[in-house]
Amino acid sequence: MTTIIGIRHTGGVLMAADRQVSGWHEKDGLRHAKLFERNNMLISVCGDLRTAQLINYHMTLRPMYEAENPMAYLTGAFSDALSEMFEKYKLSSDVGYGGLIALKGELYTFGSHKAIVQTANGYEAEGSGAAFALGALAITDGLILVLDVRASRVL
């Protein structure tokens, strides 16, 4: 059961992900993370493992320009690069995936719905364990907890 979380705070965004992968009849731990850095963005991906690998290692993504609006970059350059990657590697457009992006201190979600959404609250979760994580994040919101302690309790 995949769970990825993001928590916005005064210093930026903390993101965390499990290392679990599961299929029809098996479950295993990953050697590589579901969380990685690309072009000064922190990206985490859940759902289709192949999509996550391609985003991490093969998606051609230009850097964000200094004065560029982050939402304009994500809905333009990032989304275009994602579409081009799907075409290049002949991935079906109905592949289920989702993820979180931390960029310039803000938290965004993306996924197979093709939309980029900036989170309104200070946290977000994706994956099959998202409902549980969102509940835990809501309960711990406002508590005086060190961020990494909060993240570990949520996951």
Image (tube, rainbow, N blue to C red):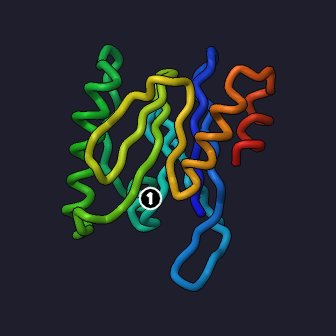
Note whether 126 is above or below 27 in the view shown.
above
> Which residue corresponds to the image point at 42% horizontal and 33% vertical from the top-left?
108
The residue closer to the viewer here, 141 or 54, is: 141
Task: Identify the image quadrant of residue 84.
Answer: bottom left
The residue closer to the viewer here, 10 or 143, is: 143
Residue 78: x and y, percent? 30, 40
Q: What SS does tag 1 mark?
A: helix
Q: Which residue is mark 1?
A: 52
Q: Tell me the quarter of the image containing the N terminus.
A: bottom right
The residue closer to the viewer here, 145 or 43, is: 145
> Which residue corresponds to the image point at 39% horizontal and 28% vertical from the top-left?
118
Q: How many marks?
A: 1
Note whether 111 is above or below 69 in the view shown.
below
Q: Is residue 103 left or right of residue 148?
A: left
Residue 24: x and y, percent? 52, 82
Q: Identify which amino acid the numbered label 1 is placed on.
A: Ala
Residue 79: x and y, percent? 26, 42
> Which residue corresponds to the image point at 25% horizontal and 60% vertical from the top-left?
86
Within 10 Å of the Cα at label 1, are there few (<14), some (14-19), or many (20+) other Cα atoms? Answer: many
> Which residue corresponds to the image point at 71% horizontal and 39% vertical from the top-left?
151
Q: Is residue 116 left or right of residue 90?
A: right
Residue 65: x and y, percent? 31, 23
